[in-house]
Amino acid sequence: MAMAGLYRRVLPSPPAIDFASNEGKQLFLEAIQNGTMEGFFKLISYFQTQSEPAYCGLASLSMVLNALAIDPGRKWKGPWRWFDESMLDCCEPLEKVKAKGISFGKVVCLAHCAGAKVEAFRSNLSTIDDFRKHVMACTTSDDCHLISSYHRGLFKQTGSGHFSPIGGYHAEKDMALILDVARFKYPPHWVPVPLLWEAMNTIDEATGLHRGFMLVSKLHRAPALLYTLSCKHESWVSISKHLMDDLPVLLSSENVKDIKDVLSTLLSNLPPNFAEFIKWVAEVRRQEENGQKLSEEEKGRLAIKEEVLKQVQDTPLYKHVTSLLLTEDSVYQLKAEMESSLTNVAASICCQGADIFAGRSGLSDRFCCRQTCVRCYRATGDNPATVVSGTVVNGNGNGEQGVDVLVPTSQAKTSCCSSGQNGCSPMHPGSNDVLTALLLALPPQTWSHIKDMKVLQEIENLVSAENLPPLLQEEILHLRGQFLLLKRCKDNKVEEDLAAPPF
């Protein structure tokens, strides 16, 4: 029986020049000699083929994010944190992208959400000379990459709108190398920059707006150190709407007369599943990997997280939140959802860790944690590090493995487990500091509806990022940026505003 299908396309040449052709190779060698292929090598190391016909924007972005060595902060498969198209879904549902593709503005939004530094330009708001300068800047460096959004028709290729990274530039011939992520269709190819500009200077019929290009680079700090907002849970839209739209209205009540009223109003009206919206990040490892020692890299990451936790707990706002959670019956359920003992939290994480090490991410019912033990490891001259060691067994009870959870803590003297080792059971991230971080991260205009000027001034002082130490300030500003990006997505305004969120 005959089977219909397509095996690649012949690259129309001219105007394009196949990268693997003799002419394409010569252009490559000359561009290397002129120093305009510096970004190529990292990009080619992470070159990927889009996994769906409409995933060109997602494939281009995940390729660039991996080339920049940006840590996504969440797992791809097994224990590995890695950007994949399937993880780029905070600005547009994957099913919708699969069916209709993705717009320029939403790819920009995804890059911001992923923790990258992004500068985006629509063609009607830029010039070919500016574009050429940006191409030159990115191709003479390996810490900035350019993604182009263009119409294939100008190159006599089949299809319409497309995204791909620019891998190099030949200055004398004024040609750019397109690393086409639709490798099942066309190979990488050189194109004249004036023609590429013409292909970008077209209208996307889906949005009625011009296409363009974006410069993607790495921020000088990690995008999230200890806390992060999650749009993975299905309720994130309603939760973000409540926090950014409904809460200011609730705070306009005449009954809000002091800080306790402000916090009580917020905490007692939080939507269900709120605990799924803001998370603290733990790290897991197999026990046999390092024994009882922490690597220098592990100690460094843990120390930064612990410093953020300490700085949150040192804020005056934390004291108000702690006092309220201790005394207010109306927020007991919220606290119960977010709070648990360190060993219980770690037992759950150990099971998740066993699952991902076994390559069965998301199936945590396959393993249960039989035993946990809180330990403090101390190397000469180092602060103690809190590690919860768990013995995990599979559902059949015929196999076990050891999993460690590296827990950021604020140290507090207490007893350890029955192992006989010296240790402690310090205060791990919980409802008090997570809620404090959330309150600090809410957009400043959240509080503007408070009618009592004295209360307004007091809460503004408590949540002001300017009053925070630099490390915590960066963390809170990142969370505020996440809030604003989520709001853009919810309000469908990502096409209107391509800039990084202001703080």
Image (tube, grey):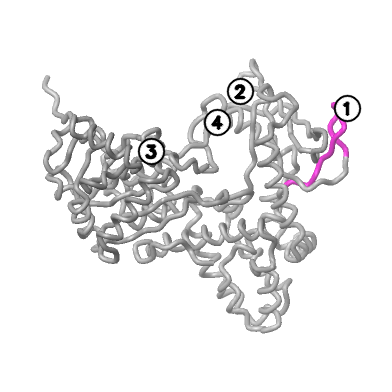
| Marks 2 and 1, how far apart at CA | 29 Å
Closer mark to the observer between disc 3 and disc 4: 3
Residue at horizontal 42%, vertical 59%? 489
Q: Which residue is mark 3?
A: 43
Q: Amino acid at mark 3?
A: Leu
Task: Report the amino acid beneath label 2.
Answer: Gly
Q: Is residue 417 left or right of residue 168?
A: right
* Marks 2, 4: nearer the viewer: 4
Residue sitting at 56 percent across and 75 percent down? 249
Identify the image quadrant of residue 15.
top left
Between the residue at mark 1 and the residue at mark 3, the CA separation in whole angstroms equals 51 Å
Q: Residue at x 23, y 51 (%)?
A: 150
**What residue sits right under mark 4 in the picture?**
79
**Label 2 residue SS:** loop
Q: Which residue is mark 2?
A: 395
Q: Is residue 143 left or right of residue 445?
A: left
Q: What segment is highlighted magenta in the picture?
A: 415-428
Kindly check if marks 1 and 4 are in contact, taking CB atoms under 8 A apart as contact: no
- Which is in the foreground here, disc 2 or disc 3? 3
Q: Of the residues shown, which amino acid type is indicated by label 1?
A: Gly
CA–CA distance in space, label 2 to label 3: 42 Å
Mark 3 touches mark 4? (CB < 8 Å): no
Q: Which residue is mark 1?
A: 420
